[in-house]
Amino acid sequence: MWFNFHTHSTYCDGKSTLDEIVGQAILLNMGALGFSSHAPLPFDCNWCMKQNVFKEYLSKIQTLKNSRREVEIYSGLEVDYIPGVIGPSNFNDQLDYTIGSIHFVEHFKNGRGWEIDGMHHHFLEGLTEIFNSNIKDAVHRYFELTREMIIHSTPTVVGHLDKIKIQNSGEKFFKETEPWYQNEIIKTLEVIKDYGCILEVNTRGIYQKKTTSTYPSRWILELMLQKKIPVVVSSDAHHKDDLINHFKETLTDLRKIGFKEIHSIKNGRWTPHPFDETGVK
């Protein structure tokens, strides 16, 4: 049986409606489904939910919870952490869970946020203007913000931990074997463990052909297993047809690494479940 708690709909930059996503989940005989549109931000953002539809979003999810009993449905948001502006804890009392993610690292002189997973030319622009072309400083700040988010605005789930690697195709800037990079990962995993967060294994980079591995990379997954950090598998789906995209391959890899359980919400509670390549048991 499959589960997915990282999904995006037409309430943000997704391509499918909530009804279409639920319909597909039922066709796939999924056990549970969570909606996690990008949370509203207090500035212009073309991929986030607009503030004026947030209440409607919550109401629509509640209606689906009551009417579509074939699958357990949960309300969530993927919330950006921007110090002094927004964080996952801002929404704790309105949702079943939160996914905390870093998309913005500092801002340009004109106040525009620097998106680390946008177009590569935009990444290079920010790297030059904000960090004087020092990739180590930029990556350090990315993971520093991740740790700050966990400590000061703790999410239920930490989203796409190492997504900044999307800009490092062909190891253009660094190798993941370099000690300074691995140290950033290790420090961040320790904070995740200390604060009891679940860490997602996100397949979107693979099926979009933007990375050759999940977020996070395999060597990080091995560290997560050693540290006994709970994991949830997600596809970060922006279309109903991607609800379980690359799940079979990812669960097979997790089994090979040594994972015996993955987390999902069952009857309103996050719980570990044994699994194989066909889903959870």
Image: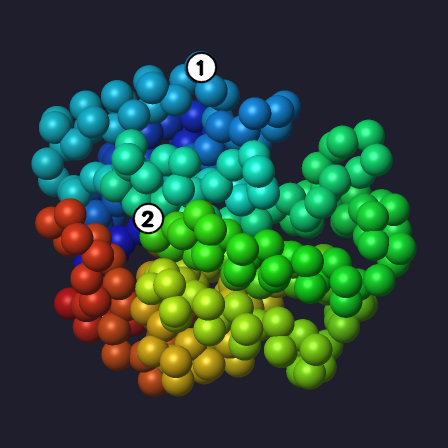
Q: Which residue is mark 2?
A: 5
In which quadrant of the rendered view does residue 200 lie?
Answer: bottom left
Q: Residue at x 42, y 76 (%)?
A: 224
Q: Residue at x 30, y 45 (%)?
A: 97
Residue that extends furthest to the top in the rendered view of this protein: 52
In what element is the residue under mark 2? loop
Q: Amino acid at mark 1?
A: Asn
In which quadrant of the rendered view does residue 44 lie?
Answer: top right
Looking at the rendering, in which quadrant would you find the N terminus?
A: bottom left
Q: Number of callouts in the render?
A: 2
Q: Residue at x 29, y 32 (%)?
A: 94
Q: Amino acid at mark 2?
A: Phe
Q: Nearer the viewer, residue 159 or 252?
A: 159
Tag in front: 1 or 2 = 1
Q: Nearer the viewer, residue 188 or 15?
A: 188
Q: Position of residue 6 (x, y in %)?
A: 39, 47
Relative to 33, say whether 188 is above or below: below
Relative to 193, say whether 111 is above or below: above
Q: Position of residue 66 (x, y in %)?
A: 12, 28
Q: Is residue 100 left or right of residue 266?
A: right
Q: How is the image coloured?
A: rainbow
In what element is the residue under mark 1? helix
Residue 175 seen by the camera: yes
Sooner in the amino-acid sequence: mark 1 or mark 2: 2
Q: Is residue 51 left or right of residue 271?
A: right
- Disc assigned to residue 52: 1
Q: Position of residue 32 (x, y in %)?
A: 21, 48
Residue 257 seen by the camera: no
Dot 2, how many residues are within 10 Å of its Cα: few (below 14), some (14-19), or many (20+)?
many
Dot 1, how many residues are within 10 Å of its Cα: few (below 14), some (14-19), or many (20+)?
few
Q: Position of residue 253 (x, y in %)?
A: 40, 77
Q: Residue at x 47, y 20 (%)?
A: 51
